[in-house]
Amino acid sequence: MKRRVVITGLGLVTPVGIGVKNTWEAICAGKSGIGPITRFDATHFPVKIAAEVKGFDPNDFLPTKEAKRMELFIAYAIAATRMAMEDSGLKIDESNSNRVGVITGCGLGGLGIMEDTILTVDKKGPKRVTPFFIPMMIGNMAAGMISIHFNAKGPNASLATACAAGAHATGDSFKLIQNGTTDAMITGGVESVITPTCIAGFAAMKALSRRNDEPGKASRPFDKDRDGFVVGEGSGICILESLDNALERGAHIYAEMCGYGMSGDGHHMTAPPPDGNGAVRCMEAAIKDAGLTYDQIDYINAHGTSTPINDLYETRAVKAVFKEKAKTIPISSTKSMTGHLLGGAGGIETVFTALTIKNGIMPPTMNCDHPDEECDLDYIPHEARKKDVKIAMTNSFGFGGTNASLLLKAYKP
């Protein structure tokens, strides 16, 4: 008998706000977190914009000594986890620590400290390298440090499935609880790679928007004038629990997680197949896993990166899965405001999807001013929309052709 799994706590560190309340209000108001890059001098870069987290102080969430020994992505993950744990009221002690695990998604880990250390070795020699370099760099240290800080001794892992990492982490955590391996999981995604090599690398691929003079309008999913995505950063964490565990302690429930699908394109390093076949199979797998039919889905939080290929092929995939209902399903891409958090995207977008269900508000897709003729679905342009959402899907698709779809539904006893 599969156990029911619910979301009891949420935490967010995003380019539009720190904390769930601040972020959600900004998202629903259509506020952009995209602006000029301040982390380094981007004067000679073709791309000069990103979605940076503003006003974050690691010392608000960590002892100063520890904060100095952590790369920013780890601090973001711990901050979001602290918020989510406080929100959920889940207490971890020796009675349950072995039954609470951590899985996070992270695409590139500590790229910034890697860049700095390479320069240090080159200019000053190997003896000048900090002993904290490796722990600051490796992507799994977000999950590891969460485990250490919150005494979660159950399964511990980090996934590096590119832009699908946060969603895969959440889906895998869902399955661990569902099958009885754990009673609760701390899960989601994190990323912080607004660095010279990251921006230069994605720019060399021509994957990024070059709308440097209009940062707030640069991320424009499904718009005919879209010219690439915008790199974002931050973390989104959910506390998942078995329903029995949540009810036993009287926990607040945001939504129930009910389906998880994953697939591989087997097509190209960076481009999805034109018919969206991998995304089609992924969404269908999630719907089947949940025991639902396609016509029961009320809302989709799209991958919606604002790249010419992704948005078109995701639209085709939605049409293939949802058939005649595709035209009537509201869809939004919150990346139009947050930018693309890469491995962290699935984390924050799972939180947004849970909040959509809980609050009955679907976030808008900003900057969709002139919809692409082939992207002709209901993308909730410009303004948030109120709707009683019973079942919602969130999609995350990554380089290497790795795909994840999650299904959440309104909780009913």
Image (cartoon, rainbow, N blue to C red):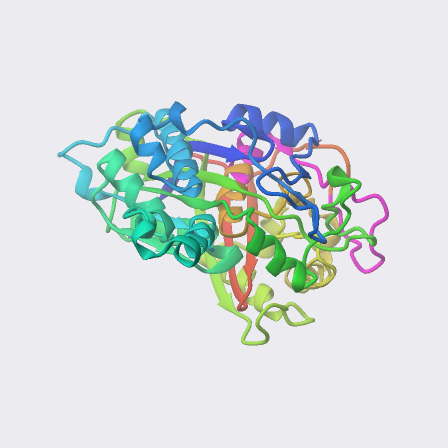
Which residue is painted at 79% across and 40% down in the image?
Answer: 214
222 or 71, which lies in front? 71
Q: Residue at x 55, y 67 (%)?
A: 281
User: Residue 296 location in percent, x, y?
Assistant: 59, 49
**What secondary structure do most residues of the magenta stretch adopt?**
loop
* Residue 202 x %, y %: 62, 59
Horizontal side of 399 relative to 383 (left or right) equals: left
Give the residue at x 69% y 52%: 45
In x, y percent, where is residue 391?
55, 43
Task: Please indicate, yes or no, whether residue 201 appears anywhere in the rendered image.
Answer: yes
Q: Nearer the viewer, residue 218 or 181?
A: 218
Side (left or right) of 81 relative to 279: left
Q: Is residue 375 magenta?
A: yes
Q: Residue at x 57, y 40 (%)?
A: 39
Q: Which residues are magenta?
A: 353-379
Q: Position of residue 239 (x, y in %)?
A: 37, 37
The residue closer to the viewer here, 293 or 59, is 59
Residue 25, located in which quarter of the rendered image?
top right
Residue 153 versus residue 290 in the image, above or below = above
Q: Is residue 178 visible?
A: no
User: Magenta span has 86?
Assistant: no
Quadrant housing residue 6: top left
Q: Is residue 302 left or right of residue 404?
A: right
